[in-house]
């Protein structure tokens, strides 16, 4: 018997989700309904889903590009966006670039076409994860990627079973990359991500691990510390390090940062659980810093 695929169905204002059959030949599906994006973000922070289906009017679908929990919705699950009218190639392309598997009309047949699209999206996401595992490094920043971070954390957890000791995972959600790309182009945004990575590496010890989670989020693993308050201080220090503007394409670009922290073993004894916890907290936190100072950062090598 096939294990049911967990699907989070999200409705935005003015939409109604199609009646997806749980017992479809492309399933079976274990459906969970959320009636607001904020509620969906809370669900994503605590539970595992194979897919997320968001029904939104086209004007609201565009808001998904800056939804704080978008990284969560595309990191583990496969994301399908259903719109009330044709989103146009530009919006559909932007959503796919952000990690959505597909953008479909809300009127898509819920008996055959939608279950088929959902199952294939889940399978494509699974194959993508397998392919990414073959590469341990985010080529754009030179940092370990998410799969490498998860593997490393699980190795440390295995050691902790014999020698108990705390550790913490800090995630940082960056706002401002999408607007930078719209103004300056993708290559300048790639330079910005690399400079963010440099500031993060400068701000931690050699024994700490800085990783790239997605286009707009990073993680820092703190494997050793004396006091839990040390973790909060490091997190605050990293956020502050990203507040001064970056010199990009002859001008200054500022970003805002939201932070989430997960402690081992209090918040979980598995890397995926810890990462979900920290990422969920970062998604729900208010980003700070975009209106910060305009002077160049003292800890920003190479003119950042």
Image: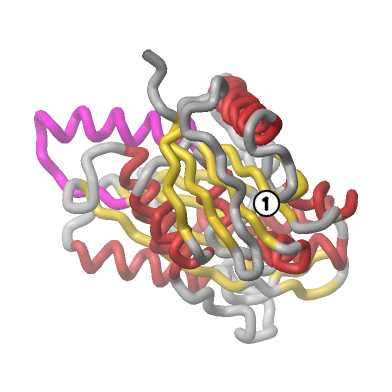
Q: Is residue 212 magenta?
A: no
- Secondary element at tag 1: helix
Q: Magenta residues?
A: 146-168
Q: Is residue 147 left or right of residue 104?
A: left
Residue positioned 46% across, 58% down in the render:
34
Is residue 224 placed above or below 290 in the rendered structure?
above
Q: Quadrant of the N terminus?
A: top left
Total marks in image: 1
Q: Is residue 26 left or right of residue 89?
A: left
Is residue 90 placed above or below 164 in the rendered structure?
below
- In this figure, which colouring scheme has been used for the structure? secondary structure
As rendered, which of 100 and 159 lies closer to the eye?
Answer: 100
Is the stretch drawn in magenta largely helix, strand or loop? helix
Mark 1: few/some/many CA within 10 Å (<14, 14-19, 20+)? some
Q: Quadrant of the C terminus?
A: bottom right
As rendered, which of 168 and 3 lies closer to the eye?
Answer: 3
- Residue 298 percent across, percent down from the top left: 60, 73
Residue positioned 62% across, 76% down in the render:
244
- Residue 101 percent across, percent down from the top left: 68, 38
Is residue 197 in sight in this rendering? no
Q: Is residue 159 magenta?
A: yes
Residue positioned 36% across, 65% down in the render:
234
* Residue that badge 1 annotates: 194
Residue positioned 56% across, 54% down in the render:
217
- Residue 232 percent across, percent down from the top left: 31, 68
As rendered, which of 5 and 302 lies closer to the eye?
Answer: 5
Is residue 236 in sight in this rendering? yes
């Amino acid at each position: 018997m096939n294990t049911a695929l967990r699907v989070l169905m999200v409705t935005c204002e003015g939409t109604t989700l199609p009646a997806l059959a749980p017992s479809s030949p492309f399933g079976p599906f274990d459906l969970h309904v959320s009636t607001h994006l904020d509620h969906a973000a809370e669900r994503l922070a605590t539970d595992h889903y194979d897919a997320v289906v968001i029904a939104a009017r086209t004007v609201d679908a565009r808001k998904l590009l800056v939804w704080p929990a978008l990284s969560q919705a595309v990191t583990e699950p496969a994301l399908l966006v259903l719109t009330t009218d044709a989103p146009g190639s530009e919006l559909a392309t932007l959503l796919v670039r952000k990690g959505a598997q597909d953008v479909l009309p809300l009127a898509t047949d819920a008996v055959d076409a939608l279950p088929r699209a959902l199952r294939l999206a889940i399978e494509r996401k699974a194959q993508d994860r397998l392919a990414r595992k073959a590469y341990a490094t985010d080529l754009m920043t030179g940092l370990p990627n998410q799969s490498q971070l998860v593997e490393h954390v699980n190795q440390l957890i295995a050691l902790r079973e014999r020698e108990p000791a705390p550790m913490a995972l800090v995630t940082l959600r960056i706002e401002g990359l999408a607007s930078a790309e719209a103004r300056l182009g993708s290559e300048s945004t790639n330079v910005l991500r690399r400079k963010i990575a440099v500031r993060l590496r400068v701000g931690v010890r050699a024994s700490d691990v800085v990783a790239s989670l997605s286009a707009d989020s990073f993680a820092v693993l703190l494997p050793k510390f004396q006091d839990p308050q040390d973790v909060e201080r490091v997190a605050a220090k990293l956020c502050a390090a990203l507040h001064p503007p970056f010199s990009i394409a002859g001008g200054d670009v500022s970003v805002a940062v939201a932070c989430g922290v997960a402690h081992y073993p209090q918040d979980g004894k598995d890397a995926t659980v810890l990462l979900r916890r920290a990422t969920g907290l970062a998604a729900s936190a208010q980003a700070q810093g975009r209106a910060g100072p305009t002077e160049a950062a003292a800890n920003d090598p190479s003119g950042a």
